[in-house]
Image (spheres, coloured by chain):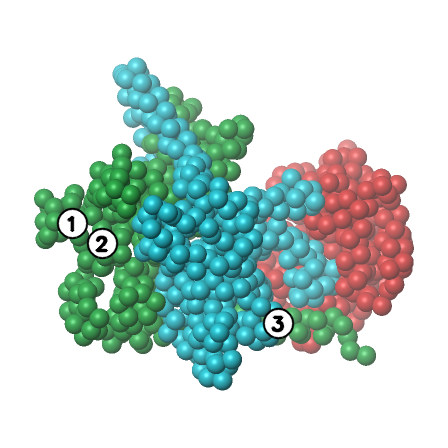
Amino acid sequence: MLDYQKLRDGTGHVLAWLFSSLSIVACLSIIFYLFIRGFAQINPDFILTPPNPTLNQDMSGGISTPIAGTFLLTLTGILLAAPWALATAIYLAEYGGSQAMVQIFRLAIDVLAGVPTIVIAIFGLAIFSLPQLGFLSSMVEGVDGVERSFGRSFLVAGITMAIMILPFVIKICEEALKAVPNYYREAALSMGASKWQSIVTVVLPSARQGILTGIILGMGRIIGDTAIVWLTLGGTIRMTGIQPWWYPVHWWSTLCNTGSTLTSYIYFASPAGEGNMPDKAFGAALVLIILIIVLNIFTDLLERFGANKIKGN
Amino acid sequence: MEKESFIDGVLVHSQSSTTFSLDSSIISIQDLNAWYGQTQALKQVNLKIYKNQITAFIGPSGCGKTTLLRCLNRMNDLIPGFDLKGSIELQGENIYAPGYSVNKLRKQVGMVFQQANPFPQTVLNNLKLPLEENFRKLGKAQLKQIAIDKLKDTGLLEEVKDRLQQSALKLSGGQQQRLCVARALAIDPEILLLDEPCSALDPISTSKIEALLIRLKERYSIVIVTHNLQQAARIADYVVFFYQGEIVEQGLPQEIFITPRMKLTSQYLQGMF
Amino acid sequence: MQSFETSSPEEKLFAVRIETKNRLNLISVRDSISEKLVFLLTTASAIVIVFIFIFIVKEAAAVLQVNSINFVTTSGFDQQIINAYNAPADKPIWQFGALGLLLGTLTTTLGALLLAVPMGMSTAIVITELAPVRLRYILRIVIRLLASIPSVIYGLIGLMVVVPFIQELLISSELQIRYIDRFQLAGNSMLAGIVVLSIMIVPIITALAVDAINAVPHHYKEAALALGISHWGTILRVILPAAKSGILAGIILSVGRAVGEAIALSMVSGGIGNIPQPGDGMVFFLTPVLTLASAIVNKSEIMSVPTIEAALFACGLVLLVTCVGLSLCARLVEYLVKRGEGRA
C-alpha cells in the first residue's frame, strides 16, 4: 500500500515548485519580451522628440512630453501626498491611542486603501469639475450650456494621485515611526522636550529611511497608474498649456492644462487606443519599466542600508 | 561546616562509575564537537544518557547545554551554519549517519521547549495532529482515546476537560506547557528532552511539572536543561555541568551538589558566575 | 554608528533643553499649532472616503433614481449607451442596466482567482520554506518587481501576445460564423482577461502570503518538526493554518484589485458587455466581456453626455460599494480567525 504521507509530501513539493516556476517564468518572460520589443525603439530621437498625432507610425515622433508628463505628475502628486501622509502617520503612531476616534480614522484610511483607482479617478473628475475649483484646470461650456470646470489637468491629476497613494504611504510611514524604539522618545521627554519636539528632533530622523522608502514606493505607484491619468489628465498626447510649455513663465499654465504620461501614451499608442502604433507603445513601456526598476533598486538599497545600520548599532 | 568543604571541594570520588544506580544507557555521545559558523559551541563531549532516569544539564548561559540537547533530536539541523563532528548513538545507531531518518528519530526523541508552544488550534487538535501525522492508521475513536490518556497522564484532563474544543492559547502558561508535554508524549517517544521548561512559569506550575517528570521517568528517559539548581537537585538522577562548551563534571546529584570535584563546579554552585 | 556620533539624540536634546528654557512660551505655541495641523491633516485623510461616497452617489443619483435595482438586474448596457448618446438633449434617456458588466466582472475575477491563488500560494511556500536561502532572496526581489509593473504594461502584453495566441489556438473562422449573430469572436475575450488578470494578481497574493507566513512564530514550526512531522506536513498542517488570517485577508485584497482593474481589462477583454452563457461550452470563456471598471475607461470619451456620465458613476458606485465591502470583510476575517485562535 502506498504511504499516504509520502504521496502527499511528494505531490505537494512537485506542485509547489511547478506552480511557482510557472508564475515566475510567466512573469519574467513578460519583462524579457518587453526588452526585446522595446529595445529596437530606444534612441535619442525617440526619447527627445515630442509625439505627433498621426496614424502613420513612422511620423508619430517620440515620447519627450509623456516622459516630462510622468515626472511632472509624479512630482506634483508626491509633493502633496508626502507631507499629508507623514502628518497622518505621526498622528496615528505618536498621538493616537486606542480611542474610538482613532479606530475610526484607521478604518477609514484602510477602506480608502481598497478603493480602486478608477473610482478615485472619477471622484477626482467629479470634484474638480465643480465650477468653484475651475482655477485648477480650465473653464468649459457644458453640453447643457452651463459653464463648468473642465476638471482635467496636471494639478487635478496630481491631487487625485495624492489621494490614491495616501493610505499606502501612511501605512509605510506609520510602520517606520513605530519601529523607532520607545526609549528614544522616553529619553527625549525625560530631558524636558515637549512631545512635538521629541517627534521632530528624535523620532522623525530615526525613521527617515522608512519614510523615504514609503515616499519612493508612492512615487512608483503614481508612475504606474493609468486610470487616473486617462480620466483626469485628459487624453491629449501633448502638453496643452501655453507653448513652449517648459518656459518658467508658462509653468502654471502647463500645470492647469492637460498632457500625457508614459502610461497614458502606452494606452493611446496600443491597438486598444486610437494611435495604433504598437512599436512606439513597446518603446514607451520599456522606458517606463526601466524607471520602475530604478525605483525598486532604490528601495532595496535603502532597506539594506537600514538593515545594516540597525545591525551596526 | 558543610559549606566550607563545598568551597574547597576537591574530594575525589574513587569509585564513581560503580556507585551509579544506573542500569543501562540509551544514548551514548562520543567526541562530539559542534560549531555555529566559526564559533565552537561544543568541545569533545563524551556522555551517556541513562534509561528511565532524569538527566539534568546545568551551567551558565551560553555554555552549550541547550546546543547539546538540540543535537539529540537534530533540531540544530534547522540552523544555517551549524556543523557537527563526532557521533551520537541512539540504541547503538548513529543518528547523524547519512540516510538516518530525522522524522523517525524525532518520533523516538520528543522535545518540550523553553517557551510553551502549543499550536494555535484547539486543545484536542494539538494532540490529534501529531498522532494523525505519525500514526495514519488510527481510527477516530482511538485518536481521541490516546489524546485523553495523555492529558490524564499529565494531570491536565481535570483542568481542561470542558475546554477541549477551545484554543490552546487560552490556557494558562503552566497548562500550555503541560499540554506541550502531553503532545510530546502522544507519539510515544522513548526519550523526552526538555529545554528549561519551567523558566517562564510560576512556582506552583513548576512544581506540578516537576512532579509530572518524576512520575514519567518510569516510562521514559528524560533529559532536562535547567538554570534552576534547586530544580536539578530535586528531580535529577544524574547531573552534567557544562562550561564554555565542555563538560566540566558529571555524576550523581549528591556528588555534584555536595562534593564537587572541580573548582569551577563549586564556584558555579556558589553563584560566582 | 556614524549617524549616532553626529546627531545623537542626547546631544540634540540637550540643545533643545537649553532652547526650551529660553523660549518656552514661543515653543509651546509652535507645538500646539503643529499638533493641531497634524490632527487636521489626519482628519482630512480619514474624511476623503466620505467625500468619495458623497460625490459618486451625487453624480450617480439620477441613474439610480430612474433604474433603482434594475441597474444591476437588467442588461443591455452597450446599446443603452448608444441610445443615450444619440438622444436629443431635451429628451435624455436614463435607462441603464449593468448586469452584463457585473457578470463580466464576476467571471473574470473568479477565473483569475482560480488560477492565481494556487500559483501565488505555491510561490509563497517556495519562497518561505522550500527554496535555498539565496534563491529566496532573488525570488523576493522578482516578486516585488512584478508587483510594481504598471497594469497598462500587462494590458499591452496581453493585447499583443495573449489575445493573438487565443485567437490562433481556439478560434476558427467556422466558430466565428456560428456565433456572428451574438458577438464577434476574436482573441479579446473573458479568457484573455482572466489570463492577464491572474498574472497581475499572482505577485500580490504571493507578497501578502509571504508576509503572513513569515509572521508565523518560528516556534510553531520547531514544535511540529520535533514531533516527527515531515516538513511538508508541518507546512500544510501547522504553518499555513497559523498564517490563515493573513493569507485570507491577502486574497480578499487581491479580489479587490481584480474587481477594480480597469486599464488592462479594457484592453484585452473585448469591450462589449455580453452575458456569457454556460451552455456555450468553451465559447463561454471566449465571450467578449466588459467589466464595471473597464466600462468607465472605455466609455470615458463620451462622458460629456450627462446621462452617460451618470451611468458610469453608477458603475463606479457599484465598484466602490463592492470594494469597501471587501475591505471590511478582510478586516472581519482577520479578526474572527484571530479570535478563534485565542489571539485577540
Quarter occupied by the C terminus of chain A: top left
Q: How far across and how far down the image is residue A111, in percent? A: 49, 42
Amino acid under disc 2? Gly
Quarter occupied by the N terminus of chain A: bottom right
Q: Is residue C39 left or right of residue C170?
A: left
Rendered image: mark on residue A259: 2
Amino acid under disc 1? Gly
Q: Are marks 3 and 2 in contact (CB under 8 Å)?
A: no
C133 or A13, nearer to the observer: A13
Mark 3, residue position:
C279
Name which residue lies at 31% across and 25% down.
C16
Q: How far across and how far down the image is residue C56, in percent? A: 42, 42
Name which residue lies at 51% across and 38% down.
A107
Name which residue lies at 28% across and 46% down.
A143
For chain C, give the colour. cyan
The crowding category of the residue bearing disc 2, from other C-alpha atoms within 10 Å (few below 14, some 14 to 19, many at least 20), is: many
The crowding category of the residue bearing disc 3, from other C-alpha atoms within 10 Å (few below 14, some 14 to 19, many at least 20), is: few
Rendered image: mark on residue A241: 1
Q: Is residue C9 left or right of residue B205?
A: left
Q: CA distance from mark 3 to mark 2?
A: 46 Å
Q: CA distance from mark 1 to mark 3?
A: 54 Å
For chain A, give the colour. green
C122 or C49, nearer to the observer: C49
Q: How far across and how far down the image is residue A301, in percent? A: 35, 56
Q: Which chain is red?
A: B
Q: Are marks 2 and 1 in contact (CB under 8 Å)?
A: yes
A255 or C68, nearer to the observer: C68
Q: How far across and how far down the image is residue C289, in percent? A: 48, 65
Chain that bears disc 1: A
